[in-house]
Image (cartoon, grey):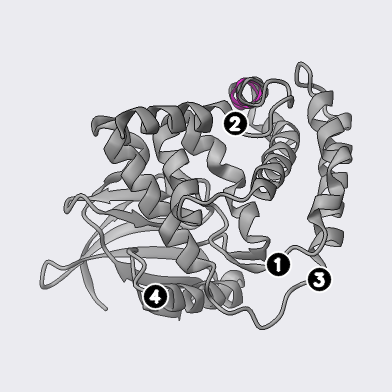
Amino acid sequence: MNFISKIGINKGWSDDKKYCVTDQNQQKYFLRVSDKEKLDSKKFEFDMMEKVASLGVPMCKPISIDLCGDEVHSIHEWIDGKDARETILTVSKEQQYTYGIEAGSILRKIHSLPVTEVREDWESFFNRKIDDKISKYKECPVQYENGQIFIDFLNANRELLKDRPQVFQHGDYHIGNFMIGEDRKIYVIDFDRFDLGDPWEEFNRIVWSAQVSPSFASGMIDGYFDGKVPDLFWKLLAIYILNNIVGALPWSVPYGIEEISVMQHQAKEILEWYDDMKQIIPSWYLIEKRLNNKRV
């Protein structure tokens, strides 16, 4: 494809370069540029996106992928719209919840893709992950206030990881990776962290959604489970959220005091949601349920 304009998009944590490009017919596309060393992983990502698109998931549908010199170029449909994180609060809480329901339903579709092989037993894999994050946290020059509560909970609930299924994961499923189109529909974006794992681990980043819109986060859970949330989900959700936050502090240190402060604030908020882990369902979900019952 030949393009007559190319505008950079400076958003997200990915090393990839992103552009809005326009062809001779004034048709816009999304162009993602990666190093050629990523060719195999980018082909896998592109293949998975094609499979997800075939399920009718609203997204930037993949069009082509090519090696162009030292770069991998993948071209996708362009979506006219705005980041959900920036626009979600401009709509009513009822609409925020509805968008969350749709996001949960989309995730259930993604998880329906058949998996032919898995990396290894999930319990063994994730316990190693917990061990690694706890080890790095203990070596970290800064600590969370009451951070030991996280570690104690993780160590006390490891047996819940036994016999968990594995599915294809989006890998970074939270409100920052959605767009609200000009058609007012919600679209999922940024599949570059595709992975395999426990389907419920996919909710480990729901913290970012709940901080912005508890209504959206609650809807996402209800939409995924069609309103029938299993008790075991809440316990595993806590494991996955706490494992993330334990690993987040050592990760933040090289980025400086601002990122460290973000993670310390998030850790404090998580402890408040769970009442220092004395309750297993986060407070924002319980509050949203009470509000929904009143609306009915």
Q: Amino acid at mark 4?
A: Leu
Which one is in front, 163 or 58? 163
In the rendered view of the protein, which quadrant contains the N terminus?
Answer: bottom left
Residue 174 seen from this side: yes
Nearer the observer: mark 1 or 3; the answer is: 1
What is the x, y in percent for residue 219?
A: 42, 44
Specify which label sits upstream in the sequence, 2 or 1: 1
Label 2 is placed on what type of residue?
A: Pro
Range of magenta residues: 259-266
In depth, the one of 199 and 68 nearer the eye is 199
Which residue, given by chain and number where applicable, does mark 3 sit on?
Answer: 120
Is tag 4's residue or tag 2's residue first in the polypeptide sequence?
4
Residue 276 lies, in percent from the top left, at 73, 21
Q: Which of pointers 4 and 1 indicates the residue nearer the eye?
A: 1
Query: Helix, strand or loop at disc 3?
Result: loop
Query: Per the image, is 146 magenta?
Result: no
State the separation of the CA atoms marked 4 and 2. 31 Å
**Could you give the CA–CA distance between mark 2 and mark 3, rounded to whole angstroms?**
31 Å
Tell me, yes or no, whether the two marked residues, 1 and 3, touch with CB atoms within 8 Å: no
Q: In the rendered image, which residue does mark 4 sit on?
A: 55
Q: Answer yes or no: do the residues labelled 2 and 1 have beta carbons within 8 Å?
A: no
Label 2 CA crowd tier, 10 Å (few <14, some 14–19, many 20+) = many
Q: Residue furthest bottom?
A: 116
Query: Disc 2 marks which residue?
Result: 282
Residue furthest top as drawn: 145
Q: Residues within 10 Å of mark 1 (few under 14, many from 20)?
A: some
Give the mark nearer the N terminus: 4 vs 1: 4
> Label 1 is placed on what type of residue?
Pro
158 relative to 45, above or below: above
In the rendered image of this protein, does residue 112 appear above or below residue 79? below
